[in-house]
């Protein structure tokens, strides 16, 4: 009888010892229904510049929160418009991603309660410049934000042995007229005439004679 009581006391002691660590722990807080927070009604990005203006041939990722049937990746057509389910053609070119997100949000309110729209430019194809002449890789190149003439030339793979590095120039349309801006490569490398190292604009053409 005493042996049974001692065994019972020992079992009770073991249970207490195992329970002590758990008693010191706080119960975990209940998590929210969705671990990811709902986005704001309209979010947008284009690289690092929210002021980016969408153009034809750009590719956009349109995400409507919890509406996978509407969300999709779409190209901007040559007419500057995109197509989405439930909506007519939407003008995208000329708007920033944030502005386009607000337009889509407003149009979707007819069909979706409290739509939450994200617009991301996944491929910038509308902003391009050309490099012609005595370079190793002439052609059309994607223009990065704040790209300069010197940066663009580095993308062209260097110069041929016949390049006239002091006579490079940039052709640009200004108020409907083509203007020519000189660029002396050797001077720029020496730190001279930094103004010649222009920040490029869409449609610029760099000519290396």
Image (spheres, rainbow, N blue to C red):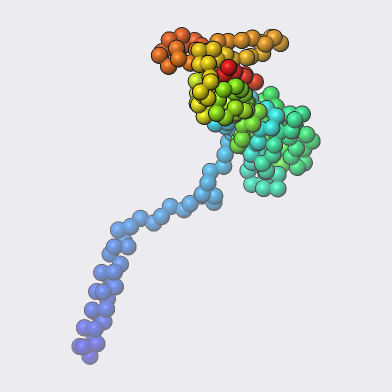
To which quarter of the image does residue 47 belong?
A: top right
Q: Position of residue 75 (x, y in %)?
A: 70, 37
> Where 177 sits versus 60, above or below?
above
Q: Position of residue 58 (x, y in %)?
A: 66, 32
Q: Position of residue 113 (x, y in %)?
A: 69, 41
Query: Which residue extends farthest front?
Result: 162
Pick whichever, 1 or 186, lies toward us.
186
Residue at the image point whose x is 30% and y is 67% from the top: 19
What is the tally of numbered marks visible in this picture? 0
Pick whichever, 89 or 159, lies toward us.
159
Task: Look at the image and tell me in which quarter the C terminus lies.
Answer: top right
Q: Is residue 50 visible?
A: no
Q: Position of residue 132 (x, y in %)?
A: 61, 22
Query: Which residue extends farthest right?
Result: 88
Q: Is residue 22 visible?
A: yes
In the image, taking residue 71 as reference, residue 87 lies left or right, namely right
Query: Which residue extends farthest bottom?
Result: 1
Residue at the image point whose x is 43% and y is 16% from the top: 189
> Where 124 sits versus 187, above or below?
below
Residue at the image point whose x is 63% and y is 43% from the top: 65
To which quarter of the image does residue 175 belong?
A: top right
Task: Look at the image and tell me in which quarter the N terminus lies.
Answer: bottom left
In the image, taking residue 160 as reference, residue 70 lies left or right, namely right
To which quarter of the image does residue 131 belong?
A: top right
In the image, taking residue 194 as reference, residue 170 lies left or right, namely right
Pick whichever, 187 or 46, lies toward us.
187
> Where 117 sits versus 5, above or below?
above
Residue at the image point whose x is 53% and y is 19% from the top: 163
């Amino acid at each position: 009888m005493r042996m049974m009581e001692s065994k019972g006391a020992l079992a009770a002691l073991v249970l207490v010892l195992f329970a002590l660590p758990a008693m010191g722990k706080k119960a975990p807080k209940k998590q929210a229904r969705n671990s990811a927070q709902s986005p704001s009604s309209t979010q947008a990005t284009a690289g690092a510049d929210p002021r980016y203006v969408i153009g034809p041939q750009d590719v956009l990722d349109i995400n409507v929160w919890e509406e996978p049937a509407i969300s999709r990746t779409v190209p901007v057509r040559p007419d500057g418009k995109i197509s989405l389910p439930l909506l007519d053609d939407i003008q995208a070119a000329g708007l920033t991603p944030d502005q386009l997100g607000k337009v889509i949000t407003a149009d979707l309110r007819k069909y979706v309660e409290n739509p939450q729209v994200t617009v991301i430019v996944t491929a910038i194809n509308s902003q391009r410049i050309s490099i012609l002449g005595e370079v190793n890789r002439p052609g059309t190149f994607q223009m990065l934000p704040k790209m300069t003439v010197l940066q663009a030339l580095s993308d062209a793979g260097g110069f041929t042995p016949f390049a006239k590095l002091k006579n490079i120039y940039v052709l640009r349309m200004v108020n409907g007229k083509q203007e020519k801006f000189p660029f002396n490569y050797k001077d720029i490398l020496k730190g001279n005439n930094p103004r010649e190292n222009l920040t490029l604009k869409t449609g610029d053409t760099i000519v290396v004679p």
